[in-house]
Amino acid sequence: MNYPDEHAETRSKLALLVAGALDAKDEEIVSSHLAKCDECAAELQNWQTISAGLRRLPTPQPPAWLLERTRSLVAARLDAQAEQRRNRMVLTLLIFFSWALTLVGWPLFRLATGGLLSLFDVRFHQMWLLFVVFSVLAWIGGGSAAVLLSLRRQFERRLA
Amino acid sequence: MRPFGVPIRITHMAGAVASVWEGRVEIEAAVARLRSGDLNALSALIARYQNRLYRYLLRMVRQPSEAEDLFQQTWLRVAEKIRSFDASRNFDAWLFTLARNLAFDHLRRIRPSSLDAPLGDDDSGETIVSRMVSGEPAPLDRLLARELSSRLAAALDSLPLVYREVLSLRFEEEMKIEEIAAVLGTPLSTVKSRLRRSLEQVRQIMEAGDQGEEKA
């Protein structure tokens, strides 16, 4: 590269040099040119004034009320998330419990009413129907209780 | 007393590295505690990032009231997403990416046609520069520095959004080029070209101001 080319090339890279965005190879080329060129060295000083000024720009301070309000907003959001997780866990447990009750309840029910041999007798007769109605009512009752509990907790949290 | 005659510069560098390392460890610990729902960790993180985040948002949207709103939204988003945050990632870059996305959504919604409308339209007369709190006192030097700062802040304020943000992230937030690329979601080459163009524009604006003053 001849001198005028090197000169122009260096000038085009000075902005990136002061921004610390030149790769090592380019930085070395630019530095070696700067060591022998006063004009480019003076030009570098202009760029350095701008970059130093940008680094020293005063920092705007957020108002104190904003920090307090942000903290309380985020705290409320975290509480709500924790409660949602708890509710989800309770509902999951209730569903598992209902399934377990249903699955275990039928054999126990048959065992109590008809003995071991009739355990797998699923013919649609009156006793089986009674059991289905009982199970469905138990499910609806459990689900409603969970929803009411969740609504009540949300209401209490809003009041607090 | 310097141990074993270690040069002052090296001990200072070691101190700075140790301080940065401690800072990282503190942030990681606070993030881990926040993930488990510790509100004190949240306060610690807000305290650590309050000035930087607010400054960045103010650079983006230019209106203090909008920056305040986005500041709150950013921390709410942090609370929502902290459980999905990958702890091996850089928290700074993650936080500023959330803030940036919210700021862009906001600008798209509020000022879709002119994302870079000049601040002079504001009736309140309040500008970013007027909100700045200056540092240490010193007679003439401080006056000159303040003059330069005001002009630079005004020049920065008049740049397009993409240039403002890249300058703010590099020179104010002191992020590495790789971190800026992660926040912006662009390749390194794009970050570099935006940096170069933005600096050139700032210089043009400053020089145009000088020429104007000379003529007057």
Image: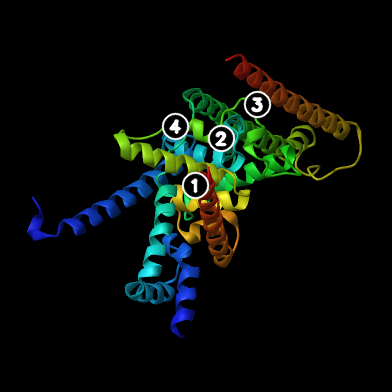
**Disc 3: CA contacts within 10 A as few (<14), some (14-19) or many (>=20):** few
Amino acid carrying label 1: it is Glu
Give x and y (percent) for residue A16: 47, 64
Labels 2 and 3: the sequence-earlier one: 2
Q: Amino acid at mark 2?
A: Phe
Cβ atoms at labels 2 and 1 below 8 Å apart: no
Indicate the position of residue B41 as horizontal and vertical percent values: 43, 35
Residue B35 visible, this angle: no
* Closer to the eye: label 2 or 1: 1
Residue B43 circle label: 4
Secondary structure, mark 1, is: helix
Q: Work out how far the residue at label 4 is from the one at label 3, CA to CA, in angstroms.
A: 35 Å
Q: Is residue A37 above or below residue A143?
A: below
Q: From the image, state whether disc 3 or disc 1 is nearer to you.
A: 1
Give residue A94's quadrant in the image.
top right
Q: Which mark is residue B214?
A: 1
Q: Which mark sits nearer the N-terminus, 4 or 2? A: 4
